[in-house]
Amino acid sequence: MIQKIFFCAFFCLVTLASYAQKCTYKFKGIVTDYHNGTPIFGASIFIKNLNKYATSDARGQFEIPNICLGEIQVLISHLSCETKEVFIDFDKSISQEFYLEHHTEELKEVRIVAASELKTKTTQSKILKTELINAYSSQTLGDVLKNISGVSAINTGNTIVKPMINGLHSSRIILMTNGVRLQDQEWGIEHAPNIDINTAEKITVIKGANALEFGGDAIGGAVIVSPDRVLVKDSLFGKSILTGQKNGQGFSFHSSLSKATKEGWYINAKTTLKKYGDFDSPSYVLSNTGLNAQAFSLHTGLKKFESGFNIYYTYVKNEIGILKSSHIGNVEDLVNAINSDEPLVIKPFSYDINAPRQEVTHQLVKVDFYKRYQNTGKLTLQYDFQNNQRYEYDMRVGSDKTKPSIDLNLNSHSFKTSFAFDSKSNQTYKVGFMAAYQDNFANPNTGVKRLIPDYYTYDFGLFTIGNFALNDATNLDLGLRYDFNYINAKKFYFKSRWEERNYDIEYTDLIIGDYNREWLVNPKFKYHNFSASAGISHQLNENNSVLFNYALSSRAPNPSELFSDGLHHSAARIELGDLRMPQERSNRVSASYNFENDKTAILIELFYNQIYNFMYIEPEGTEQTIRGAFPVWVYNKTNASLFGVDVNWRQKITKQIDFKHQSSFIRGKDLVNDRHLIDIPAASTLNSIGYQNKKWQHFNASLESNFVFKQHLFPNNNFDVFIPSTNNTVLLDVSSTPSSYHLLKFNTDVTFKLSEKSKVTVGFTITNILNTKYRAYLNRLRYFADDLGRNFVLQLKFNY
Amino acid sequence: MKFNKTIILLAGVSSIFLACSNNDDLPEVINEEELITTVSATLIPQNGGETILLKSIDLDGGDGPNAPVISVSGNLTSDTNYAVTLEILNETEDPAENITLEILEEDEAHQFFYSFTNSLATTTYKDQDANGNPVGVVFDLVTGTAATGNFNITLKHEPNKEAANVSSGDITNASGETDVQVTFNLTVN
């Protein structure tokens, strides 16, 4: 019974028998608990507009005779559940399956119901569930997402992990947290997403620009982090997760508490603390790689069927140490670091986090309101404010030692509204409008030239999406979106740089001030972006289904692609943006095939993504300064194509043993220069075998093997550099990729029931069991040090 | 009716956004701290003769596109002992900021290294930090036979001064971060 109250979701199968005459139609159906499939007894079925009642029997079945042609409005209610409302057009005999989530806001979402998690709607998407997210409580969002084939990560060390979807990352991915698009200087590779993974109950990854409701510029895809569902009943429950690990000699603690009333009021508070010292590679300490993290969130509101509101606040603060030996001066230091097998600085283990380090605080406030209109749909209004404060500390001398080198404050406001026309079960529409304002302030007190200038932006977006159930087996999604972006920046350029970039020819009118050696310029740019998406899914028969999808999207250049200008100390390179950058445009086509029966589930996903004006950064020789020579990395554009295959296979061998396989392969081409694209993840394959036995306190054990191939397809950007102190010319090898590697992971857990409402799960994990030395191509610190060595992790999870 | 209300609300919220566009303040120009524009070396022959001045000036800073302007006041004399003093300046400030003083304040975290091509000369450190390790702001330079070649000066921040041969001026094991690296083309007559 408890379970029934918790999972107030119905699985309602409606069969309608038609008769020749009018008003002799029969409305038959079954009401079941979606989660465990048990029939629900005593649910009342009320046809509002005909004033006819029925009650489900012990088998969950009901029957209402003598119904006329036309639309009927059905209310299904049960003592311990919320009332559901369904509209059914009675025009012919239909046999439909409705999956009605208990989440009332998502009412009437038409899905293909499937036993495994592999099957999707009309986009290539995948959902990660609470249990898996909890297991990664001490890690990052980027780490847990690697459990999806086709999703990898681009790292700076092991604490700055950015998700990468089908080879694309940073500005090409939208990160949604509780309905808010994260605005946290997301373009930088060394800028980790400011999300506490523990606020997520469910994470959905959508591959490709199909989440038009959230934005039209997600050429790579979208990561949607959703918080816990709100239960409309008197309840008080909580969860605590304590994780300790050997590597990094640290811990992570998370706790959450939720209270709700049957009137619909709820409040939920969460907090997370993490502390790690220096991590270890298999054979040495990775000096200055510790982490201090604090997070807090509060979620409250009123949730009723007709209307409600939510208020959400989060605070995330991360203090991250950057590998000491990765901090280098000029190109000679870089050559020395690359040529050295071990990092040039190895110190004893410490919890201290010294320069170079980052300190980033992100705060988010969201208020939303919804109201349902009878026979029409649902209106949603939302406002959110985000503040991102980023400090980066470099090794400096004298009185500047404690001063940050980068001090950026980004404030973002956004307002959005949408109306979902969802009264018809077989076709739903949504229209929406978005307005956003953002202001970036680069504090001049750093005494270091601004890497990103002061700027403000306006964004306006309009979208419409439609879902159509064409028949029992076929679903169609269509979407259109238009975005207007405006950016107004005020930036200082060295006069020498201004001329070197040839801006003095095209952009003289942007100059608004003459400051001795520098110009103050005021670039104002406008971008019009159109995006569209279309997807169709078809169930061929009980076991086989296919989907096809097309997405058009465009993305305006981000501030670093436009304005980067100067020495990026943490990367020891001069980075140059380009004011002339046009927006990039992507056409992505994809197809998926799914097979599924009791024992086997197979999902094969294919995609081809052609991107015009694809913006990327690559080395272009060196520039001589008084500090020596520095490599110059320039933002360029080209036309690119990405092609890939992601495979998922799950096989039940016996009732207790199952096998899982996932692999992905991707190829990126620069079509203009006819060569490979930089930073494309290597092919990888993950195989695991698991054993579970519910009788032994829900015992689980699994052994996972992850093989990552060497990336042989990369552009050769190597160049010769002159080393003055030895009077030699050497080749700077920034392109060669690391060897393939194989990692083994073991995981086991048991769950003990403490009382009716509380339980404890004890988990133990060993990662990199063989203590393999490896370097990953997409870890920016691969030039300097090996990746993490073996780790033992012990986790205690209490649910109460 | 209900939609009209929505539109009014939308218009209201939009106007708030438009109202906060008063962003006309000009950003403050940054006078870069710790900026090194100038490295100069004064070579005074110990037994009399012409003082030689070596200078490298990079006025567009550490990341401007223009290469440093390098000047050498004259040719060196063979088999001569020169007493050399280095001066590191930030000449974008007026008066110029003397960075040498900051280096000497943190002398344990800094060391200069010198190298020559064609065996132009040899050097000997003439100063020490608190640990008895060299800093290299003051040093002796003894020229060899007549030749032409390069003289390279490198300043390392946080070098490992205890590593093998570092205190005798060998940069190989020094690690650390390069703050200055300049090369002068010299002729020894």
Image (cartoon, rainbow, N blue to C red):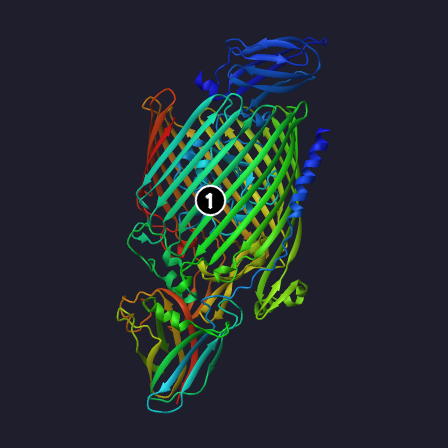
Question: Which residue is denoted by mark 1 in the rendering?
Answer: A152
Name the one closer to the observer, A236 or A599: A236
Name the one closer to the observer, A189 or A253: A253
Q: State left or right for residue A24 relative to residue B81.
A: right
Q: Where is residue A664 in the image (x, y as percent from the top left)?
A: 47, 42
Name the one closer to the observer, A463 or A691: A463
Which residue does the image show at 33% across and 91% down from the upper left? B47
Q: State left or right for residue A548 relative to residue A747.
A: right
Q: Quick check: B89 above or below A490?
A: below
Q: State left or right for residue A764 relative to residue A329.
A: left
Name the one closer to the observer, A700 or A704: A700
Q: Residue furthest bottom?
A: B48
Considering the numbered disc 1 on the image, is that residue within a helix, a strand or a loop? strand
Q: Quick check: A754 above or below A639?
A: above
Q: Residues within 10 Å of mark 1 (few under 14, many from 20)?
A: many
Instruction: Classify the position of the N terminus of chain A by image quarter.
Output: top left
Q: Is residue A229 among the parts visible in the rendering?
A: no
Q: Quick check: A412 above or below A340?
A: above
Q: Position of residue A750 (x, y in %)?
A: 33, 28
Chain containing the residue with disc 1: A
Q: Is residue A577 among the parts visible in the rendering?
A: yes
Which residue does the image show at 64% across and 52% down from the upper left? B22
Label tally = 1
Q: Quick check: B85 above or below A681?
A: below
Which residue does the image show at 52% across and 12% down from the upper left? A60
Q: Position of residue A248 (x, y in %)?
A: 33, 46
Which residue does the image show at 42% across and 88% down from the upper left? B75
Q: Position of residue A576 (x, y in %)?
A: 55, 61
Which residue type carries mark 1?
Ser
Instruction: Classify the position of the C terminus of chain A by image quarter.
Output: top left
